[in-house]
Amino acid sequence: MVISTFRKLACCALALAGSAGAVATAATLAQIAKESRCSEKPVRIAGSDMWKCMTSSGVQAFFNVPDTAPEPSAPAQRGNASRSVAVPSPAGFPKVDAGTQKARDDLRRKVLQDELASEEKLLAESRRVWGDGSPQPLPEERANAQAYADRVARLRQSVQLHERNVEALKRELGAR
């Protein structure tokens, strides 16, 4: 008898807690709608915690109400959520024929190859000037070791920059 009464009390407490949460959410929705200066009843945006309403000035207000129960009419997502869906182009959207696109791709490849050739020349020149990290000191650098070290650091950075550029251009050409 005591266990039965205890279970009844526990069930009542859970039911009250659940309805209190719904009241709190409703109060929160009403409160946020009031703060957003909604002139109409807020409408839930399907499948999210977002709501929208029209303000007295005629502007749509959007706001988020966390922990609201999902909309029952919202369809449940099934399958792989990361799968992309092909969206057709809108009517009147300009289309490019295959020949024109191939010509553009060929031109782009040519430009990238020219950039790669130029960057490889700059890399070779930078490596020659850098001299494997020990270039000949300039006359003004013989008395100032810090000036020499600064120039060697700038030359090393130049070599690294050109190496990164060559790698990036090769990646771009390989991806096409």
Image: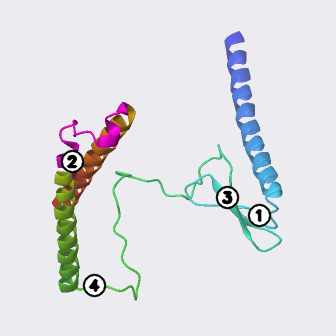
Which numbered circle lies on residue 169?
none
Give left or right: position of 122 versus 39. Answer: left
Which residue type carries mark 1? Lys
- 10 Å neighbourhood of mark 3: few (<14), some, or many (≥20)? some
Residue in view at x 73 percent, y 26 percent? 13
Q: Which residue is mark 3?
A: 51
Residue assigned mark 1: 41
The residue that mark 2 highlights is 129
Looking at the picture, which amino acid does disc 2 mark?
Answer: Val
Q: Earlier in the sequence, mark 1 or mark 4?
A: 1
Q: Does the magenta segment cover residue 136?
A: yes
Separation (CA) of disc 1 from disc 4: 47 Å
What residue does disc 4 label? 96
- Secondary structure under the numbered disc 2 in the rendered image: helix
Q: Amino acid at mark 3?
A: Trp
Q: Give percent across and percent down for residue 88.
A: 36, 76
Cα gap from disc 3 to disc 2, whole angstroms:
64 Å
Residue shown at the point (22%, 65%) measured from the top left: 115
Q: How is the image coloured?
A: rainbow
Q: In which image quadrant can residue 2 be found? A: top right
Q: Nearer the viewer, residue 129 or 142?
A: 142
Q: Position of residue 28 (x, y in %)?
A: 77, 46
List x then y, in percent, for residue 69.
63, 47
Q: Earlier in the sequence, mark 1 or mark 3?
A: 1
First-in-chain label (2 vs 4) = 4
Quadrant where the C terminus sits is bottom left
Q: Residues within 10 Å of mark 1 (few under 14, many from 20)?
A: few
Residue 5: x and y in percent read 72, 17
Tell me if label 3 and label 4 are in contact, CB under 8 Å: no
Is 103 on the left-hand or right-hand side of 5? left
